[in-house]
Amino acid sequence: MERFIRLSSLIGNNKLKELINSTVLVLGCGGVGGYVIESLARSGIGTLIIVDYDIVDISNINRQIIALTSTIGMKKVDCLYSRIKDINPACTVIKIDKFINEDNYLELFNYKVDFIADCCDSINIKKLVIKYALNNNINIISSMGTGNKMDPSMLEIIDIKKTSVDPIARIIRKYLKDEKINKKFNVLCSKEIPRKVEGCIASNSFVPPTAGLLITSYIVKELIK
């Protein structure tokens, strides 16, 4: 495809075809997930399943790729659907505009996917999705915390067992240990100690997007290796 000629020059036509024939599910369309979806679309992924129930809020403008004055109040999945189709009309986009909870999370696994990018905010849902994916040999990478951090150079893709200062990673490590799940599992995590902020989880325009791009880089390299 002409629109991906720069990518095919880098990885070859056969590898590009592998990406075009791949399906990736992205859980969460916020600061991290939005950039995962955008960069996957620009990498030629043939089918994207995007999951979120939220709408664009004015407070999202500082970090979310879909957040603009013109999109405030719109469904995030609708905004991303339009962006994906504008990037690559041939991409099949499946929108799941639903609040994912303990009662319905298994619906995500009704789809045959090559990779899951977990970018959701709910730790409970992270636990359940990670557990199911690992127990059923489904490729997954999960984003840990990107809030209250200022240094994108401290982000890395790392085995969950080797994470250190991230509070969410600490919870997930303990959960996997308690559940006796010992499979190798990579996460996007930061070595930066979160800053203490009053009243909310603070964010910026460069840490969550960098996290999203690192996740896409990992997924693409895994799909074509």
Image: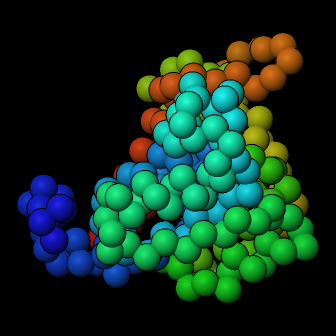
Q: Kindly identify the residue that appears in the image at 81 percent across and 23 percent down.
A: 200
Q: Position of residue 180 (x, y in %)?
A: 81, 68
Q: Is residue 113 visible?
A: yes
Q: Kindly identify the residue that appears in the image at 68 percent across and 81 percent down.
A: 109
32 up-or-down from 111: above or below: above
Q: Kindly identify the residue that appears in the image at 71 percent across and 16 percent down.
A: 195
Q: Is residue 157 visible?
A: no
Closer to us: 14 or 81: 81
Q: Position of residue 130 (x, y in %)?
A: 71, 65
Quarter of the C terminus within the rendering: bottom left
Q: Kindly identify the residue that appears in the image at 54 percent across and 37 percent down.
A: 70
108 up-or-down from 195: above or below: below
Closer to us: 19 or 46: 46
Q: Position of residue 212 (x, y in %)?
A: 49, 45
Quarter of the N terminus within the rendering: bottom left
Looking at the picture, the colour scheme in use is rainbow
User: With 80 as the anchor, is 54 left or right in this view?
Assistant: right
Q: Position of residue 142 (x, y in %)?
A: 62, 54
